[in-house]
Amino acid sequence: MINGIVAIVGRPNVGKSTIFNRFIGERLSIVEDTPGVTRDRIYGKGDWLTKDFRVIDTGGIQLLDQPFQEEIKAQVEIAMEEADVIVFVVSGKEGITNDDEYIANMLKRQTKPVVLAVNKIDDSSKIENIYEFYNLGLGDPHAVSGVHGIGIGDVLDEVIGLFPTKKREDYEGYIKFACIGRPNVGKSSIVNAILNEERVIVSDIEGTTRDAIDTPFTKDGEDYVIIDTAGIRKRGKVYENIEKYSVLRAMSAIERCDVVLFVIDGEKGILEQDKHVAGYAHEAGKPIIIVYNKWDTVEKDDKTMNKVKEKIRDEFIYLSYAPIVFVSAKTKQRIHDLLPMIHDVYRFSQLRIATNVLNEVIMDAQMMTPAPAINGKRCKILYSTQVSVAPPTFVLSVNDPELLHFSYKRYLENRLREAFGFDGSPIRIIARAKG
């Protein structure tokens, strides 16, 4: 459960990306001395003192008429709207600039708490450089060095102290599922069809749903929560400031849900952006059901459904485990199939296999088809165990992890699916050296 969202803002080349990388503990954001390297918002996840949070790294704002400045400013405004706390990064080397003052005035016009971080204070002799930043009127400045990690803990202490105290309802014991997809594929219409009532706005205007909407309900004795989200837009359109659209909200919905309904528009067919949308859920390890909506609008014969299925499998090779259902939210065709499928794929994602049974299946698979030899050596699986669920994750004790080729992993995954099902759920297989 995320406790809060942090946006990092500031002019170019003050070290925002370096501090972002410190917050999340890995080098996700590009760090260069060239101003303006970060143009889009970049998202990461961090934790500090038992608090989990998301971090947004933004492009630098400046007054000069530089390329992409309007787009970057729109990105920053959206990031500030999404955030619970804003970290404003300035440079202790250059002192206050006109750009710093311009950004400070932007921050004063909004209501989110701001933490002021004076970066590039690499040794204690430069600590007096922070005092002039009191003139920005944003509270006490913190001396930090993103390069050396100095003062980062003090900034995070203040940040987590400013997070909202009330967490979003987690609906423990409910099966939570999210509708994701490009704008205008019919996600809200599917939600309405499932609920059989008008609980969310439905419109032909792309991006009508601007935030995640949680709708709890009960069906056949099972408790569910629908998390409806705004459509995930391709990067070029995220710049549209008037829409204030948030990829982060869709990411958070995917993170919070137990099952993903990945919705494709049957009228427009499969577009390149659909692959990116589905990739978010796949990488998160969520069970996925592919929902081909607007089936009533498709001209078809008795071969059309199989042809579309083949195309989906070709375009989404990494989702070979995901069941496909053809629906029409408008006519409610096959809508009644969705909840049973959600229930089933959720149960498969939670399935635990007894260790002795698992080892029998893996050893039989190895005997039937040994691993391919690599440089004269062959991977030997000595022992297997399941270490977690959601997604089901299996650790194989092997003689040499480097010898377990990805194709053999795929073979083992197929044998596991044949033996236990796991319909709709991804499977993770990890190889570790014996001992």
Image: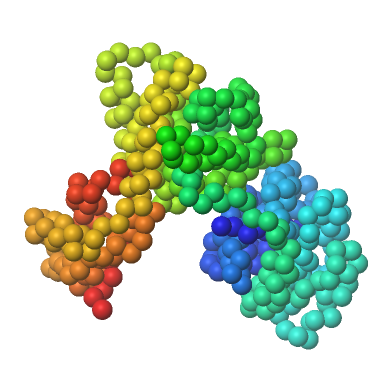
Q: Locate the C terminus by quadrant.
A: bottom left
In percent of the image, x 23 and y 75: which residue is there?
434
Q: Please say whether residue 414 is visible from this viewpoint.
A: no
Q: Nearer the viewer, residue 102 or 401?
A: 401
Q: State the count of labels.
A: 0
As drawn, is 311 to the left or to the right of 19? Answer: left
Q: Quadrant of residue 215?
A: top right
Q: Position of residue 136 (x, y in %)?
A: 88, 64
Q: Is residue 398 above or below residue 372?
A: below
In the current view of this chain or complex, which residue is farthest to the front? Answer: 221
Q: Locate the N terminus by quadrant.
A: bottom right
In percent of the image, x 69 and y 49: which residue is there?
82
As drawn, is 112 to the left or to the right of 322? Answer: right
In percent of the image, x 63 and y 28: which residue is there?
201
Q: Position of residue 148 (x, y in %)?
A: 63, 78
In percent of the image, x 28 and y 24: which residue is there?
306
Q: Position of residue 144 (x, y in %)?
A: 72, 75
